[in-house]
Amino acid sequence: MKTILITGASGFVGANLIQSLSPENRYLLLSRKERPEWNSLPGNFTLVKGELASLDKVNFPVSDIDLIVNLAAEIKDEALFRPTNITGVEKITRVATALGCKAIVHLSSVGVVGMQFSAGPVVVNEDAPCFPKNNYEITKLESERILKEYAAASGTHLVILRPTNVFGEHHPRSGLLNLLQHLKNGKPVPTANGAMVNYLYVGDLADTINWFIEHPGVSGTYNVGGGCTMDHFYSITARELGSGFKKITVPSVLVKFLEGVNYFGLTSIGTRLRGAVNKVTYTDERLLSVKPYRFGLETGIKNTIDHYIKKGKL
């Protein structure tokens, strides 16, 4: 039986991960708060109250840990970016040393590359140079650097996962709901020829994390979630909704204009149009050479739509 510490266990990804974990291991769930459904978890789950920024002050009920899964991150509050995403990761390395941990799975983001937009086709793999554009991306890239240096010095197996746009049931900000309602109502959507989207079903992310938990000798950086054309994404989504798919083709002259506009100076309308013509694709070929997705995009969309229908939102 392995002992595994999971940080950020109460979050969107953590809640989905817990449902897929093997009953043969012991899990320590680090969280500031307890989710109601945790009351029914089996005895191999233990809540450890605390937060990443003060991880080295937490009293753990064990003397050793086999693997740390770091899901905790701050994505909204600028004041907490550094304490959580950088200082917190530094604390992970100290706890790993103190408790003899030899494997870490770290949830990062494709955002560290800083490739938000391109009017022409661009394929981004894990070896692409990183030029983060905002403080969240900067701190997430720094957390990767800290862990890579620690792994190299300590011999720790390190897996860095960079998911694309994660969607699914129980998304904290109801991800995709506005778009789903828009399509169900038969409203047209703007898109350009060759525009791409990069989405990842949360069930596939949880399953991927679980696979690396069960294979602790693997190391490397992996994009999770590949791209597909926007037309394909809208088509399968509209089909699952039982509605038609109407689109407004954005003219090429507007695409060229948006290419030259400063990203952070865009209006909300400009930002939406920019997303509608974006041709950046994140490739997940490295991950797929190791394991396939359990669900896939179409099943993920179907599950998400079914969830919102049951909630009376579609």
Image (tube, rainbow, N blue to C red):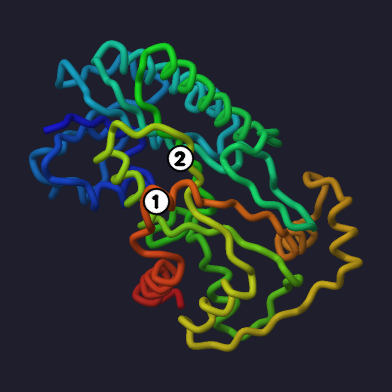
Indicate the quadrant containing the N terminus: top left, top right, bottom left or bottom right: top left
Give the answer, above or below, for where 146 lies relative to 248. Answer: above
Pinpoint residue 9: horizontal percent, then vertical percent.
Answer: 31, 39
Query: Total marks drawn?
Result: 2
Q: Please give left or right for residue 180 compared with residue 4 in the image.
A: right
Residue at position x 72%, y 59% in the image: 278
Asked if residue 133 is positioned above or below residue 169 in the image, the reply reads above
Secondary structure under tag 2 reads strand
Which of these two is toward me, 70 or 169? 70
| Residue 298 in which image quadrant | bottom left
Rendered image quadrant of residue 197: bottom right
Of the residues shown, which amino acid type is indicated by label 1? Leu
Residue 27 is situated, as x and y percent measured from the top left of the image, at 19, 35
- Residue for point 76% across, 59% down: 274
Q: What residue type is disc 2 on?
A: Leu
**Residue for point 56% across, 68% down:** 178
Circle 2 is placed at which residue position? 161
Q: CA distance from mark 1 to mark 2?
A: 9 Å
User: Is residue 240 or residue 82 the one in the foreground?
Assistant: 240
> Which label's residue is closer to the chain start, 1 or 2?
2
Question: Residue at image x 12%, y 45%?
Answer: 23
Q: Residue placed farthest to the left in the image?
A: 43
Q: Are marks 1 and 2 in contact (CB under 8 Å)?
A: yes
Question: In the structure shown, which secondary structural element does the residue marked by tag 1 occupy?
Answer: helix
Image coords of residue 153 (percent x, y): 42, 12
Mark 2 neighbour density, 10 Å: few (under 14) some (14–19) many (20 or more): many
